[in-house]
Image (cartoon, helix red, strand yellow):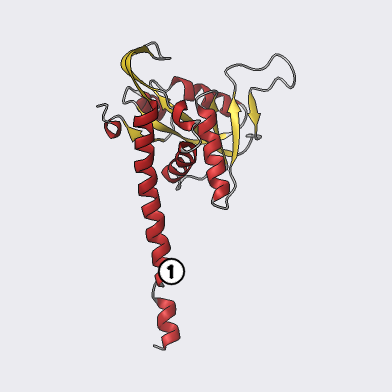
Amino acid sequence: MSPAENSTAETSPAENSTGETSAAQSDQDRVSLIEAVKDLAVVHGTVTLSSGKTADYYVDLRRVTLDGAAAPVVGRVMRELVADWDFDAVGGLTLGADPVATSMLHAAAAAGGRLDAFVVRKAEKAHGLQRRIEGAEVAGRPVLAVEDTSTTGGSVLTAVEALREAGANVVGVAVIVDRGTGAQEKIEAAGLPYRYALSLADLDLA
């Protein structure tokens, strides 16, 4: 085999370095996200969740998804989480899903890609264009439904229902933090794959 053939057949140092750098970046992003959630989002004390359930702590992920330093990390981690899913738009029920979707949009752009975002209102507007879904058109498109965290799956499934009514093909659901309180089972029972970036154990809450 000639030197030229040999160099073509083997993985070049540059290619190997790029792969290792990408993996190292993903690992570092996940560690950074865990630290950000612990430092910014975990609030201890008895709280009532949107599902009506009570907990002795609250994970206020908007303190992370709306943080200038943490939001880009959220976008990269969430894109990596669903890298093998095929979709070209992302969003969910306002308000928790909104910054998650936009962080993924910006992460895609930073990586030289394209990802559109949308917002699902809790109810149709009574004025203007009277749209339930704002932003990118979703009819006929593969879309990802996201949420910052989910207790019972109710909020994200409300978004899924609206998206399906609008003609979207919802490929799955992804959240930043899974609370381990039944959301996964409910979402999967609705026929959707479900993924989460972090568990309560990752945050030392379990």
**Circle 1 SS class:** helix
> Is 193 left, or right, of 99 in this rendering?
left
Q: Is residue 190 visible?
A: no
Residue at the image position 50 percent from the left and 25 percent from the top: 96
Residue at the image position 53 percent from the left and 44 percent from the top: 107
Q: Is residue 99 visible?
A: yes
Residue 153, picture quadrant: top left
Q: Which residue is mark 1?
A: 14
> Is 136 left, or right, of 185 in this rendering?
right
The residue carrying pointer 1 sits among few (fewer than 14), some (14 to 19) or many (20 or more) residues within 10 Å by Cα, namely: few
Front residue of 115 and 71? 71
Residue at the image position 41 percent from the left and 35 percent from the top: 193
> Is 123 left, or right, of 17 in this rendering?
right
Residue extending furthest toward the right: 128
Q: Amino acid at mark 1?
A: Ala
Residue at the image position 41 percent from the left and 72 percent from the top: 12
Q: Is residue 117 above or below residue 23?
A: above
Residue extending furthest toward the bottom: 2
Q: Is residue 29 above or below residue 17?
A: above
Q: Is residue 130 above or below residue 138?
A: above
Front residue of 183 and 161? 183
Residue 8 drawn at (x, y percent): 44, 78
Residue 1, picture quadrant: bottom left
